[in-house]
Image (tube, rainbow, N blue to C red):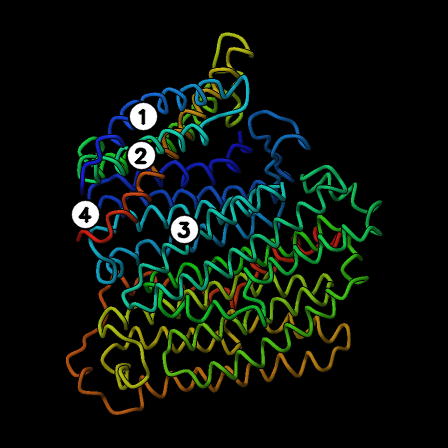
Amino acid sequence: MRPNLILQVVAKFVIPLMILFALYVQFHGDFGPGGGFQAGVIFSAAFILYSLVFGLDTAEKIIPAHWLRILAALGVVIYAGVGVASLLLGGNYLDYTLLGSNPIAGQHLGILLVELGVGITVAAAMLIMFFAFAGRGRE
Amino acid sequence: MLSHISLLLVVVPLISAPVVAILPRGRLPWAVAFIVAASCAVLAGVQLWAVLHEGTISYELGGWAPPWGIEYRIDAVNAFVALIVATIAAITLPYALLSAEREIPEDKIPLFYSAMLLCLTGLLGITQTGDIFNVFVFLEISSLASYALISLGRQRQAFTAAYQYLIMGTIGATFYLIGVGLIYSQTGTLNMQDLATILPDVLHLNTVETGFAFIIVGIALKLAMFPLHLWLPNAYTYAPSVVTVFLAATATKVAVYVLLRILFTVFPQGFAVTTPADELFIVAGIAGIITASVSAIYQENIKRLLAYSSVAQVGYMVLGIGFASATGLTAALVHLFNHALMKGALFMAVGAIVYRVGACRMEQIHGLGRAMPWTFGAIVIGGLSLIGVPGTAGFISKWYLVVAALEQQAWISVAVILSGSLLAVVYVGKMIEALYFKPVADAGKAVSEAPILLLLPTWALVLANVYFGLDTDLTVGVAEKAAAILVGVQP
């Protein structure tokens, strides 16, 4: 891969902003437009940009493939686990009301955790797909 | 407390699927998957018992009251189908251990069991939920998992088969979703019970009729109803043996269940009669039975032969639904159960042959019946059940189907059902001839009986075929109750 200085400098400038924006979309999801899915895609877009500019091998050093698989699974477990937690607290599945000291705090915490799970899984799955396609020629 | 069972049936496999995916290679993923499937079978049994003794179970997800929240609503119909799915999963998984080790690359084993659990989640979810959009979500979960499972087959054609199924399945799911959207636009609700009360007022609208048509065609694709069955033979032929067993015994059955729900619970009773759907089912059923049975006779690969036979069996169920009577629906539901038993047993026996010989084309299995007597015995009894010989489960379902046809004096249907059995004699005979009466091929000289771990689940299903051919309390009893709920009369 031929290094391109302008691209690398611009990418280094843009990538932190992208990640910051992803986190904003993630944690603002319960007040306004946004949420785990969008945040996960934006988050993974930052990594995809990084691997386009700096090469696949460098990118895979930052997030090894087996980590991605664990992260993708972890997100689903977080989502389903929140449901199980509310079940154990005596409510129905995914009944967030019981998670906090009062119903509003409970709903708030519940949706935040669930969206976090979604975000982690979506970001990891997007990257798995990207690496699977991008890495095809290498073997 | 009992109502939580309806939820646990979906959540237990759902939460264990990602856990299994990250377990190390070896036999641990299998062990977890087996425990999960076995506990689902127990839960489904308890659920059926609870529904039969204590009435309908309603579960509000997230504590949001229906019709706004998602509701799981279990009556005898879904409890029965859920029990079939979970039990088949619990019997298939012990079989999976050796079969998967032989047919699936070692590094894919944890992902394979994870996909199996996701497929189970989706299928059980479809049966549990009382929300038509939620049905779509679970339909996609089970379908996506099954595309991945089919593509794991050893031959390269598995990719084409999975891709073909992906395209057809996605068209089916999209049609279903379009239909749900159209109906939602006119009713403003997605809850099945709520729809049942609102829909009668808006039935005259073209939008609702169009939505109905989209939903029926979409499900018919998933169900492999003739002539929308073209994805099925390839998918069943090239998938790994254990995947074929699981999908053949469960996936189309769950689609039949969705069809029943839409036709009889969501839309009011007589609605299908006012549309061409009614005749369509009878015509499609008849055409499916004849064409697919004849196609089965000409197949040179036994997995493919059985796959075509599955299309024919779906034809019987569709025919039973087309009669739209309590007896017809009882026949469809009983056949749903019995067909899961017979196709499960037959595909397992074929999988045992694949395990030993690595192939299942007619000329490669010549004379193997003598080297593998137990496997051969399973094929003979499973085949007899498929034909509908008295004393096997197949006889019971054919009997009820013929009774339903006679009730309506549908003489053509009676003739078709009986000739379908005769065609089954031919294709089952063809398998038995190749396995037993042909001289042993060179490759088959050193073949020994399949390992006990493959034979036990196979024979469990074979004996179930005989048992449910003699004792029909569970099958016919529950199916009659379920059919009564669907057509809205007390037995």
> Can residue B458 be seen?
no
Give the vertical position of B75 relative to A41 (above or below).
Answer: below
Label 1 environment density (alpha carbons within 10 Å; few <14, some 14–19, many ≥20): some
Dot 3: chain letter? B
Q: Quadrant of residue A1?
A: top left
- Frontmost residue, A10 versus B17: A10
Q: Amino acid at mark 4?
A: Gly
Q: Amino acid at mark 1?
A: Ile
Distance CA(mark 1)–CA(mark 2): 8 Å
Rendered image quadrant of residue B472: bottom right
- Left/right placement of residue B171 relative to residue B488 reads left
In the rendering, at what x and y percent does residue A135 appear?
24, 48
Could you tell me the amino acid type at mark 2? Leu
Secondary structure of the residue carrying numbered label 1: helix
Residue drawn 31% across the image and 43% down it = A130
- Residue for badge 2: A49
> Label 3, label 2: how many angstroms apart (C-alpha)?
30 Å
Q: Which labelled disc corresponds to residue A15?
A: 1
The label on residue B26 is 4
Mark 3, secondary structure of its residue: helix
What distance separates the C-alpha of mark 3 from that of mark 1?
Answer: 34 Å
- Label pair 1/4, CB-CB below 8 angstroms: no
Q: Is residue B381 visible?
A: yes
Question: Closer to the observer: label 1 or label 4?
Answer: 1
Mark 3 = which residue?
A: B145
Q: Are marks 1 and 2 on the same chain?
A: yes
Q: Earlier in the sequence, mark 3 or mark 4?
A: 4
Please give the name of the residue rendered at 76% of the width and 72% of the height, measured from the top-left corner: B407
Q: Are marks 3 and 4 on the same chain?
A: yes
Query: Which label lies toward us, 3 or 1?
Result: 1
Q: Nearer the viewer, residue B170 or B265?
A: B170
